[in-house]
Amino acid sequence: MNKLNVDVAVIGTGTAGMSAYRAARAEGARTVAIESGPYGTTCARVGCMPSKLLIAAADAAHMLDLAPGFGVHPREKRIDGRAVMERVRRERDRFVGFVLESVEHFPAQDKIQGHARFTGPHTLRVDEHTEIEAKTIVIATGSTPVVLPQLKNVGPNIVTSDDVFYWDDLPRSVAVIGTGVIGLELGQALTRLGVRTALFARGGSVAHLSDPEVLHAATRTLSQELDLRFQTEVVRAEQQGDEVLLTTRDALGKETSERFQYVLLATGRTPNVHGMGLEETGIELQANGVPAFDSRTMQCGNSHIFIAGDANNELPLLAEAADHGKIAGENAGRFPDVRPGLRRTPLAIAFTEPNIATLGKNYKALCEGGRPKFAIGKVSFENQGRSRVMLQNKGMLRVYAEYGTCRFLGAEMIAPRGENIAHLLAWAVQARLTVPQMLEMPFYHPVIEEGVRTALRDLAANLAKGANHTDPADSEPGT
């Protein structure tokens, strides 16, 4: 049994783990990185990058469908599924290669392969070959797709988003379970690539939206293109040859059975914190098994253990994982000198078309008891000039600001080029700008961002009415 004594042990080499490793080393700490699987982040292998490659192919196909609206009539559209997936895999492997190059620069003695398990507060056992005693430990073990109990052990055609990007060809048909970000992105992309696709959701949620008006606009917009089945639960599934017979139940209790080549689970991800001996550490665990931690420092209680990235179940996004890792690594490396790290304005984007985005404080958070009253401004993109020019005039933006201070607080949207709008507004939140200050900024013509100005003007008018004016939040449905 190999025995090591180190300052910092980082468990996991995804985005958070690599960030933590580098940060701890920068503090001068003797650091090791432990990995139980292949090197390469979730984002590069099965997340952000391969999904955007599939979406890019889908957008190219969709533009051909839109072309006649501009008076342009292309020849007959032909989608080569094998070529689509070959490019997705080729470019995915290229992105993974960049990650592997980064790991290759880690000193060989710092890389330990195997499953790490706590044997005590400061000790880890890696498989049966290495025992590690560490002054501090960073848990950055990532997450795994959730599999519904009624779909476990059904057969090979029950898949998760992790499996999609290993397909050799586009399938004939897919049932997507879940209308979160992953489900919507993949569902729309497959639909646009000619795959018969249906999306099922137990409730009525869409991505990460909580604003009822934006949610309504998103549901209406996406339903024009996608086969969305809300208020529908999965009852059972049966593998039959190379297809799955899927039975679902709608809100009225009616059961329907349909055949799909694949059933794609997009019902969220669960932190990889089980089976690693956390009970040996003495730290407090939440009901879901994730250690209780301080989101400013990533410290678990007052212990020497830190947790970062998807493993802590806070915000499963690459940018957040990188920040988590840096904060955890720095604090682990200079322990016991633990300091709050930089937490940026929350920003989440679904790369559907139109884009769905939330930033800053969302509608749900602002409606929680005890918070200041807030004003709302909005704009519909149906008649927004540049959006109509591009035949992308669908969606809605709602913006929020605090009465009295007029400070801009956040926004929710389904909007054309919403990924760009969301960044502008997230910067405004982080800069603590007021609505009058934002309206002093330049707006060119004709651009989609003119819609932002329209929403801000509406917001300014509602702020001027004052907090005694009927707060839109009090009369919104669903609050």
Image (cartoon, rainbow, N blue to C red):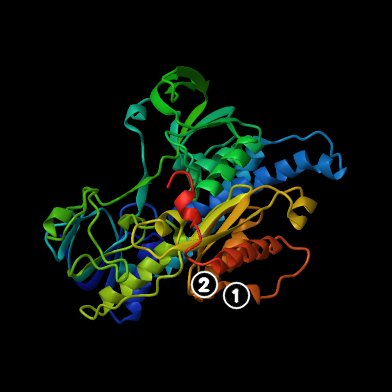
Q: Name the foreground residue: 39 vs 56.
A: 56
Give x and y (percent) for residue 244.
Answer: 46, 22
Count of marks overlaid on the render: 2
Residue 287 vs residue 145: left or right? left
Give x and y (percent) for residue 216.
Answer: 55, 42
Q: Which residue is mark 2?
A: 406
Dot 2 crowding, Cα within 10 Å, few <14, some 14–19, many 20+: many
Query: Where is 99 relative to 215, above or below?
Result: below
Residue at 50% across, 19% down: 258
Considering the numbered disc 1 on the image, is that residue within a helix, a strand or a loop? helix
Dot 1 crowding, Cα within 10 Å, few <14, some 14–19, many 20+: some
Give x and y (percent) for residue 288.
Answer: 24, 48
Residue at 49% across, 45% down: 182
Q: Name the foreground residue: 425 vs 179.
A: 425
Gap in Å between the C-alphas at discs 2 and 1?
A: 8 Å
Q: Amino acid at mark 2?
A: Cys
Residue 370 vs residue 303: left or right? right
Q: Are marks 2 and 1 in contact (CB under 8 Å)?
A: yes
Q: Which residue is mark 1?
A: 436
Q: Name the foreground residue: 323 vs 394.
A: 394
Q: Report whether residue 103 is seen.
A: no
Query: Where is 154 relative to 470, above or below?
Result: above
Q: Report whether residue 237 is seen.
A: yes
Q: Amino acid at mark 1?
A: Pro
Residue 281 vs residue 247: left or right? left
Query: Where is 24 relative to 227, above or below?
Result: below
Give x and y (percent) for residue 389.
Answer: 80, 53
Q: Name the foreground residue: 133 vs 459.
A: 459
Considering the numbered disc 2 on the image, is that residue within a helix, a strand or a loop? loop
Query: Where is 197 relative to 216, above or below?
Result: above
